[in-house]
Image (tube, rainbow, N blue to C red):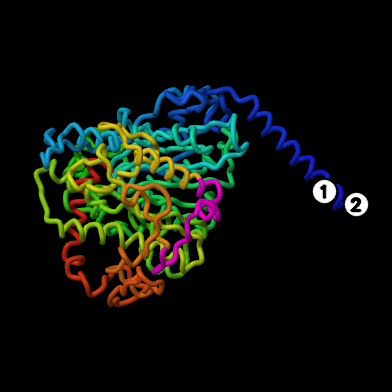
Amino acid sequence: MKVSAFLISAIAASTKASTLLQSRQSNWAIGQTVQTTSGPVNGHAALNESQVSEYLGIPFAKPPLGDLRFAAPVAYNGTATLNGTNFGYSCPAQVTTYNTTLVERSNVSLAIGLPLLQTVGTPSTAQSEDCLTLNVWTKPQTGDAKKAVLVWIYGGGFNSGSSSTPSMNGKHIVEQEDVIVVSINYRVNIFGFPGDPDSPANLGFLDQRLAVEWVRDNIENFGGDTSRIIISGQSAGSASVDFYNYAWVEDPIVAGFIPESGTALSWGLPNQAENVALAWYNVTEAVGCGGASSGNVTACMRTKTTTEIINGISATSGSGGTLGSFGPTVDEIVVFSNYTERSLAGNFTKKPLLIGNNDNEAGLYIATSSLQGLSYPDSYWQTFNLIGFTCPTAYRANYSIQADVTTWRYRYFGSFPDTMIVPNAGAWHAAEIPLLFDTNIANPPETTEQIAIGKYMRGAWAAFAKDPENGLTNYGWPKYEPGKDTLIRLAYNNQTGINVANTSLYDADCPVTAAASTSTNGSTSTSTGTATSSSAPATVSSSGAGSLELGFMGLMSVMGIGMAFLL
């Protein structure tokens, strides 16, 4: 009898919940007020997507000002009605300036190169430390009553970036793919990763986590499904996704991960605490707060203006990590010193992974280096692609497979007239973002193939979000297996649809794949050479070892140039 009563109660509760969902869907008004823990939020119809409700600039944390500067974020709880009309401020960052004339190469001009880079990497809002906001795009009135949620984390080398960047607007994905998109701000540079021994480290990552908690607590009111929250990002945003994967194993909240062109194993990350502390004290001395022996410099730093602190960062040159003085820092709480060991032990979240990188990530840095009058040989950039992106992506995908985690791996190849920032740029770092978000500036106009590829990619990302375990299998993708024809080549030869290749075609000089992945399936089989260890991603195979090891710091310094400008 007790069981029957329980079942009746459960059925009644389920029926009531279903009725409420159906009511919300049938009665939804575009831009209607939504109740959140931050307060009621008014929205509006997204520009050029009149059926998408857009809610911008929602605070998820108290403004990190005064005593909250250089402190962990504190959740924002409000009752006043919020006007979701405009993006919030971008978090403070150093602004890099260049010669406004893009180096001419084979008649490729500033008209294509620089405007496209700025669209992909330049925020549309002013800077302020009161920047911890997020944005929601939703279309509850059609499709699933409870929709999968894509949370987007921007890149910027942990030095810059903003959710207001035009190329990362989520409205078109929402209109086309029946998912919700949320983009978030987080603190960067010294404000997000200060290196202050007397303050918590990795504040930017704590910001990201708090934003995900906000999504968990509020997204149902926008039509979202809390059991299908996916975090995704590109470049430093991609690395952020992977750092999250290791940091919150016990309570991940999310159902899957999409890192695009960056991992926790990339670019010599993370920084050591003592190096970032040195950079911190260089800044504190530069702004007049004294050094390590001066007592509580944190209180003094909280009295300085944002501009004074940013100007003081120039004093840190050469004292920090490879992507800048202030970035992810070992604290053994959120960021760890032993990612190889943790990876081998499977000490990360066992949730599905869609991971990949672009075929010629270096194309971006060729352009940004040119803007500073720098030039490097092709062999340099080939090594840059391998050590900076291909190998870390392979390592991370293989660790996932070794832990029996559902994994898909892609490599993006698209190269089109309106994305050719320099001749032969190919699929450069961040080139996929405008296609994924359907935000190309289209100058010259998009090609038919380009439009089709963008639609195909949006479908793939949405398929993963809707069903992280099986969605891409149903989309026709094989699950990743090292050394087999399971690498998805997106936009290969600018064609749409399935194109698979053996992973060894690109991973031959990466020892963790070389040791585990000699293909056995015929025409695409290649021997991957000699590897020193299948579990030592810090080493390289005998072919190319010297160039990789000797060129590492130079390669990463060039990444710093590009990251400061764009991602």
Q: Residue at x 28, y 39 (%)?
A: 301
Give the CA separation, mark 2 to mark 1. Answer: 9 Å
Q: Is residue 529 left or right of residue 76?
A: left
Q: Is residue 92 magenta?
A: no
- Residue range in magenta is 463-485
SS at mark 1?
helix
Q: Residue at x 13, y 44 (%)?
A: 370
Q: Is residue 12 left or right of residue 337?
A: right
Counting every numbered tag in the picture gives 2
SS at mark 2?
loop
- x and y, in percent, of residue 338 in the image: 37, 66
User: Which of the pair 415/493 is nearer the observer?
Assistant: 493
Would residue 414 be seen by someone viewing this image from the given angle?
A: yes
- x and y, in percent, of residue 247 in the image: 45, 56
Amino acid type at mark 2: Met
Q: Residue at x 42, y 62 (%)?
A: 486
Q: Considering only vertical position in the picture, is 130 above or below 404? A: above
Amino acid type at mark 1: Phe
User: Which of the pair 85/196 is nearer the observer?
Assistant: 85
Q: Considering only vertical position in the picture, is 192 above or below 41? A: below
Quadrant holding the C terminus: top left
Quadrant position of residue 452: top left
Name the residue beneath numbered marker 2.
Answer: 1
- x and y, in percent, of residue 345 in the image: 46, 69
Answer with mark 2 or mark 1, whichever residue precedes in sequence. Answer: 2
User: Which of the pair 537/347 is nearer the observer?
Assistant: 537
Q: Is residue 46 left or right of residue 422?
A: right
Q: Residue at x 26, y 47 (%)?
A: 428
Q: Main secondary structure of the magenta part?
A: loop
Circle on res. 6: 1
Count residues near mark 1 (Cα–Cα under 10 Å), then give few for <14, some for 14-19, many for 20+: few
- x and y, in percent, of residue 157 in the image: 28, 47
